[in-house]
Amino acid sequence: METKKNTKAKFEQVAEEIEQRIQAGIYVSAQKLPSEYDLAKEFDCSRLTVRKAIDALIQKNVLVKRPGKGSYVMSKIQSGRAGLQGFSEVAKAQGKTSKTEVISFKKLTEPSEKIYSILALETKQPIYELVRRRLLEDEPMTVEKIYLSEMYVADLSIKDFEGSLFDLIERKNEIAYSHQEVEAILVEPELAELLKVPIGSPLFRVHSVTYAIDATPILYDVSYYRADRYTFKNTLTRYAH
Amino acid sequence: METKKNTKAKFEQVAEEIEQRIQAGIYVSAQKLPSEYDLAKEFDCSRLTVRKAIDALIQKNVLVKRPGKGSYVMSKIQSGRAGLQGFSEVAKAQGKTSKTEVISFKKLTEPSEKIYSILALETKQPIYELVRRRLLEDEPMTVEKIYLSEMYVADLSIKDFEGSLFDLIERKNEIAYSHQEVEAILVEPELAELLKVPIGSPLFRVHSVTYAIDATPILYDVSYYRADRYTFKNTLTRYAH
DNA sequence: GTTTATTTGTTCGTATGTATT
DNA sequence: AAATACATACGAACAAATAAA
């Protein structure tokens, strides 16, 4: 029995140190990192721990590596506009004010078969629709329509919906993952007004279904993003095998 | 040199077997998998090997897991339309005919500073622009403008460009990864004609920069996708920490 | 062109800590 | 509190890919 582990995992510490060295310019883009053996010696840990740290940084798109060659620093994205995900996080990160307005909240009188199927619910079970608008610096950014079953909203009021929906849901059922699909469409009059964009402007429409760990669908969400304010960013890696 | 091991890595075999069991319905969505100990015993390997197999399947969005609970089968995306990446692969997978037309190929007389900066080239160095149109079942799907330095095109002819550009490039320099940024825009007259869509239609515009493992930029690419034919799909995972 | 050194990849065994039920 | 299941970590060894001698 060594020290009681109250600290972060060692492989995370190693990963952080490596990342900081990249930030500090000690390991530069295009430069090869020291070998796993050397890093293990330097950090006084096993090579497997170094490998876990490196793997974590690869998953974070910070490093790339090749068998027999070594590990390399990935070239950084020169981030321009914000990515699609994480509305309130973006606001916080940029020190901007964000607001969420509840446009409507009601029990659907005639839910479509599609929604029942997506949420894996019996027909006739009540489904609620929540429409919210999110603003950044008082400018409308996105409108989202969220469909959920009664069990998640039974004891909630409109006031609750002005905060993070995920936090609310997770008091009842832990969220594991979401599937998303993104389309580009033209804005319709109703949305044009809500988002304050001209008729004929392009929008992103994002359908997402969120699941619990046992694959139970929790909510179905159709969100509209102003294409003049949002872009997607992502990284594709070769040698994925 | 006598060959000893010609087989796949054991953790890959285990991963394949688990995936096949999911496909075969032996492990069903919402069902918990056997514990890592049990799987290790069954596959006659160490627990670490099972963990590596499970990790690989998590990265493939096939499984999800939680400390103390277990591993679960992720609900599958009901894939409708094709994703954005992999044009010829999609065509092949769906048994459809695909074609690539070279619209133009020329040395730029006045490359912009932006392109020089993205490709990390000295000003005055020649840059080539390749414009291609890709069709699926004789229907135009996407138009791409590709910018590369002379070294990648010096010994190539137009005929070469009708195939896979990545394969061509990789004869000179191995591709490691790409950064992408996706916008939604309105089609312009010139593109409307090439893509055979009405004026005012929405398009995806994808900027991507492709790098070698040492972070050397290899090519810069601006592609336009018909929004009525393409959607993005992706999966977000919670508990990413 | 073959050999050798370096570097990453795979795998085992073992032990202990942490989370969930 | 106890049992179960995943998480972290070490040491050791050999395989395979790459690059240099």
Image: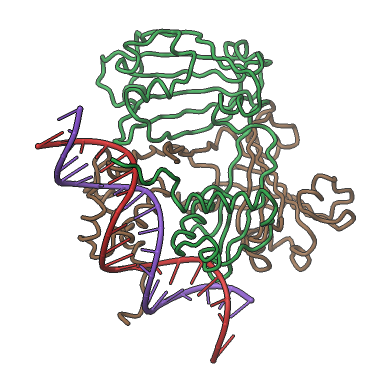
Chain colours: A brown, B green, C purple, D red
Q: Find the residue positioned furthest to the front.
A: B2
- In the rendered image, which quarter contains the N terminus of chain A? bottom left
Displayed quadrant of residue A223: top right
Q: Is residue D13 left or right of residue B64?
A: left
Q: Name the residue rendered at 60%, 36% in the picture.
A: B232
Residue A130: x, y in percent? 75, 52
Q: Is residue B181 above or below residue C5?
A: above
Quadrant housing residue B155: top left
* Location of residue A141 in the rendering, given as x and y in whole percent from the top left corner: 60, 42
Name the residue located 48 percent from the left edge and 60 percent from the top edge: B51
In percent of width and height, residue B63 lies at 58, 55
Between A47 and A137, the residue placed more toward the observer is A47
Q: On screen, A193 above or below B58?
A: above
Looking at the picture, tell me which residue is in the foreground, A36 or A222: A36
Q: Is residue A144 above or below residue A46?
A: above
| In the foreground, A39 or A62 | A39
